[in-house]
Amino acid sequence: MDTCIKKIRELSAELLEKGEVQKVIGFAQGTIPMATSPIAIESKQDTEKLVFNSTCGLNLANYASKQKGKVAIIAKGCDSRNIVTHIVENQIQRDQIYIIGVPCTGMVDKSKIATLFEDEITGFTEDGNTLRVTSSSREEILKKQDYLRENCLYCTHKNPILYDVLATELVEEQMLEKPFPDVDRIEALDTDAKWQHFENLTKNCIRCYACRNACPLCYCPTCFVDEAGPQWVGKGQNKTDVNTFHYLRAFHCAGRCTDCGACVEACPMGINVRDFTRKLNKDALELFGWEAGLDITKRPPLDAYSPEDPDDFIK
Amino acid sequence: MKFITIDKKNWTKGIDKSRGTYRLFGPVKDKNWCMIKELDGDILPDMEYNESVMSAKSVLFPQSETILNTSLNESVEDHHIMKRAKNDYTARAVLGIRPYDAKAIQLVKMNFDTKEYKDPYWCDAYEATTFVGMAITKPGPFDFSTSVDSGPFCEEGLDILLADLDDSFIAKILTPKGESFAAACGFDSTIDDKESQALFDILRKEAEKNINCRVETDKLKEKNLLDLHGASFWDDLAFSCINCGTCTYVCPTCWCFDIQDEAKLKESSRFRNWDTCMSPLFTRHATGHNPRGVKVQRVRQRFMHKLKYFLDKYDQGIMCVGCGRCVKSCPVNIDIREVCHTMNTYEKKD
Amino acid sequence: MENPYMPYPVRIDDIEIATEDKSLKTFKFVFLNEGDEEKFAYHAGQFAELSIPGVGEIPIGIASSPVEKGFVKFTVFKTGVVTSHLHNMKVGDIMGLRGPLGNWYPWDKLENKNVVIIGGGFAFTTLRSSIIYMLDPANRSKFKNIDVVYGARSPGMLLYRDELFEWEKRNDINMHITVDSTDDPSWKYHTGFVPQIVEQNAPKADQDTYAIICGPPIMIKFTQPSLTQLGYKPHQIIMSLENRMKCGIGMCGRCNIGKELVCKDGPVFTLDEINQTPKEY
């Protein structure tokens, strides 16, 4: 993936120089190991600031749709699916956005890597499939494949769905016999254990809303939890209120979620927010044969009616 | 001021002994990290933790805290008349608090304990609390506490400062509160003051040497507030911000809160929750008008409050103790050290 | 020290519809406990939190005047959750009142000065308090000329109409009442926006003249140039700000303009002071 950054910079410089776009939205190197930060580049010389590596775990779709004029965006498979969703949901026009597609080999699970060390990580470099991670006490050489985020592990759309240009060659997509082993595990639990699973999941939630704000689907001008008249949800740390937020947000993402993992990436408390959305993704696939963000001409299943829609729930 | 030594073999027994008179709080391992929690039952504090993802501010200032209660039942004599919530202010001790977190509590105190008003909930909790600090011998890479008048052995706001000597702790008893807590634990093997202080000094210097981050704040005071506020760098700085509340909630010095009422059947309560200047709701008027309605205004508010307004208002340094939590937790890596540098070196262009 | 979050229990003693569109009501409260009224001693220009258990609190300027005894009065615009609830409450209901909060118009500084009061819409509450205070026989001689410019959308939207017309008849106060427009042929006062009426009718500034402005941000914004044209210097223009507040005692952190907290260091500032702060109001 490191070879693609040269190409990304070249393409960006060219687009800016020719005035084809006002900005290029991508990632910049962070100030600490394994951190990157979304950035808007406006001049050719600043394109040197762009990076692309296995720590670019956020989703850039929301950054692009809030811009004036035409912008270019660096898009992994999942980012591109969210751009498709944004186009379908009228958040951005196709001709307002120039997509530099990056076939993706997966993002790393930063907290999984962090647990290997007793102290803080002070250095992180990658070379192909090899990660070199250091702390003040030692160094670990890791295989990237072993430390991918869970959503990347199950990803079947590594290649951008929609793009104007590619920064590197397409990669092979994986076929999964069981695309939702994590959901299957939870589904197999009995009711009490299932309940307990979700209770435990949110017990450390501090309601910072990082999951929501990092989510490319959460662009509502006023989120239901922020609505004051009427106020739908209490604002305290009451368990029911906290869970109501998570459940309702997940349902609002049903049939729209691309499993990009930005919510988990952003959560400061290590909550696997995807446990809420994955079941709905599975339902969307099983009930409607639907995966979000694959087709610019189709509205999400809960947004459209078809006589073929499953209706087994009508007794 | 005196020093005592605590053999680690006696630590648990002593701590358990204090539970008769103190509610204990301290670091508890939770998955990959530590949380500061009440040590219910016989839970012991994890004194070897590196850092806690959340600070110890919640010991005095819980994320959600009931302040008043009222009955709405009109057949009750004093219905609709508010009463102070019965919170527990019996003696409590927070074990293993990091020196920068204890210093942060002193900064927060300036907000809650003022000449004109005293916040009774915070002040009563503060009065009830004994702060047993754990000196940091291996500072993390994001620790810049020595740049901001704190440090791995900073005593400010502590009643006891512990230093870890592998088999034992040396405790520097700093206040009468600290003395009472040590007595309640039965920790009483005093050791030579001069020698112990000398040892503390060596350990402190050693620890401070391991702090590699330096953040300059020296020019912030002389900068013109409106020039900084109007500076052009805020737009770029705020671009990546997703406007979540992470930085403010993990911060040991962020004290802003919201007040909410809730009623359940005929009982109502008023409570306060941590709030965040990152949220547009924080300042939105009932009419819809919002003085900080745009993201960049909110990002600017957070940093201006910490690094300029607070400094100008109290002249007690900046509102940051250098714990580095926000640097590490920010989903988009907005780094207060860089922002501080940008502000400290800002020159207005005419 | 007392718990600053604890409201005084009060009973709603009277509710009066204040404007023709019924969006404003004036509530008169009496204290339930003896001694609380004395503890609530206030100055014209201060505000208080109206505190409804189970619903919430709202900061509202005190409309009654320190010289009026036995009750306190607030005129409330129905807009959010708490104000809507309050509008549905009835005489005899028990609620809370927390305050007085904030600073007040600088009455010491205004002694022996000409005072021009400028108000718009429903931001006339603390100005009413101020006028009643200044006109009180015990106080009137402390001030020189008093001019009042007060405007609303229409005659029916003017607050405290009976009092306005009473003051109009007096010769120790110059009233300049205006409405944006009216089709009432018997309307005998001004027609036009507040900034324009100020420009035409307010006294020119000398060093002994101060203006107090209270109104929606847009009115304040357009009145400032009128005053500047009349020679008022920033330190002679006194304004009362409204920001979203919760605690009212300078702790919860949301109402700041720069390092000033509107609830505690304000709500009253001179334009001079405001010019030193970011315009976040």
Image (spheres, rainbow, N blue to C red):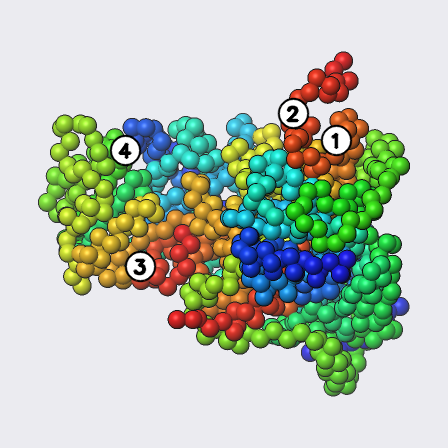
Q: Residue reaching furthest front?
A: A18
To which chain does the residue with label 4 belong? C
Q: Which residue is mark 4?
A: C157
| Helix, strand or loop at mark 4 | helix
To which chain does the residue with label 1 belong? A
Depth check, mark 4 against mark 2: the one in front is 2
The residues bearing labels 3 and 4 have C-alpha atoms spaced at a distance of 28 Å
Q: Amino acid at mark 4?
A: Met
Residues at marks 3 and 1 touching, judged by CB atoms closer than 8 Å: no
Q: Which residue is mark 2?
A: A304
Q: Residue reaching furthest top?
A: A315
Q: Amino acid at mark 3?
A: Thr
- Closer to the chain start, of discs 3 and 4, is 4
Q: Is residue B34 left or right of residue A130?
A: left
At horizontal 15% and vertical 56% (from top left) the residue drawn is: C204
Front residue of this view, candidates A255 and B90 = A255
At horizontal 70% and vertical 76% (from top left) the residue drawn is: B212
User: Residue B140, percent across and down?
Assistant: 74, 69
A146 vs B173: above or below: above
Q: Which residue is mark 3?
A: C270
- The image's mark for residue A290 is 1
